[in-house]
Amino acid sequence: MTAPATRVGARDLERRIARILGATGVPDADAVIAAAHLVEADLRGVHSHGTIRVPTYVRELRSGATNPRPNVHLAVDHGMQVTVDGDNGLGMVVAHRANDVAIARGREHGIAAVAIRGSNHCGTMAYYTTRAVAHGLIAIATTNAGINMTPTGSGEKLVGNNPLSIAVPSRRPWPLVLDMATSLVAGGKLDVAKARGEAIPLGWARDAAGNPTTDPALGRAGSLEPVGGPKGYGLAVMLDILAGVLSGGRFGAGLGAPGSAQFLLVIDVRRYLPLDEFLERIDALVDQLHGAAPLPGVDRIVVAGEIEHALQIARERDGIPLDAPVLEALGAVERDLGLGDG
């Protein structure tokens, strides 16, 4: 039986994670950026990309697989088109700085595309797209992930479950935000199930022999199922092209080694319509969707980003529920770094 989760204050958790990352040599400002990102993932219910990731990041930083003090710089600069080299830094820090460039250039030119190489796992892609909508920008973001899916018709893992996020400004308390993996579920959900000692639904993953499995550990050792079968496989490959091939970074089989790449695209709404008119049209679209007749057993129709926003508001007030294994792993990392618990 799974032990009940412990509720932790968001700001306390941010400070705790920042302290841990700082102890590995990450500069204070960068540690704060990464900690805020991880806690936001937990606030929004995306635990697969939240605090549970800290031990992995610490291990990679301490082993030298990730550079704690990278020289993040513009490798190519054509105004609207930029390539950022992350110098093998912590992915959330590299992508955050590249996101700042994308937002600034998008506001200046109306549209901007930033490719990122020399990066690492960068957390949730919605974090970057939602930062852009506050500036009146539509944002699209993707990253290539480790090799964890097979091409359709093959048993050989050669494809990442590369995620896609699209965020759109709105007048609602939340922007419209799509954030999805190209696998049926994010790989981190298997990690969460494993930490809780729970089985996964049949159809999420296959074991190393290609058999469907309900064991999250066997699924992690095997492969994730693409969303929509060949459609998910095809989309994952195209996103790898945008993130990995175009940037000059790792792609395809090269993702078997540490490191990943990202791609950010922002579009200034005001270059097409006055912002107020655009927001009015978005309101009309959301009203149409909210007004759709729900099926029996469905309370109401929601749009992308709505549920996560409501959860974030509640958890900012009531605390973030963290499972015992996640808190135990966090405490073990602190003791190993000589920080004590908390």
Image (spheres, grey):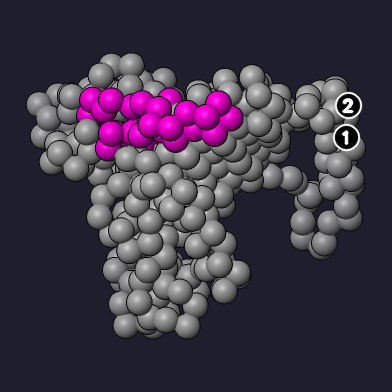
Residue density around tag 1, few if under 14, some if 14–19, many if 20 or more, within 10 Å: few
Q: Give the camera-side residue of 227 and 53.
A: 227
Do the residues bearing badges 1 and 2 touch, measured as CB atoms within 8 Å? Answer: yes
- The tag on residue 281 is 1
> Distance from label 1 to label 2 (Cα)?
6 Å
Task: Say if 45 sits above or below 105 in the image.
Answer: below
Residue highlighted by disc 2: 277
User: What amino acid does circle 1 point to?
Assistant: Arg
Q: Secondary structure at mark 1?
A: helix
Residue 181 can be seen in this image: no
Q: Range of the magenta residues? A: 68-97
**Whole-percent x and y of residue 238?**
54, 59
Residue at image point 57% right, 62% down: 235
- x, y percent for residue 163: 51, 52
Left or right of residue 196: residue 203: right
Q: Residue at x 33, y 16 (%)?
A: 29
Give the total of numbered labels.
Answer: 2
Q: Is residue 77 visible?
A: yes
Amino acid found under the numbered disc labelled 2: Glu
Residue 80 highlighted magenta (yes or no): yes
> Is residue 158 covered in magenta?
no
- Farthest residue toward the top? 29
91 w.r.t. 342: above or below: below
Determine which quarter of the picture holds residue 85.
top left
Write the residue at 85% across / 23% down.
274
Quadrant, the C terminus: top left
The image position of residue 129, as x and y in percent, is 58, 35
Task: Kindly indicate the quadrant of the structure image that contains residue 49.
Answer: top left
- Circle 2 packing at 10 Å, graded few (<14), some (14-19), many (20+), is few
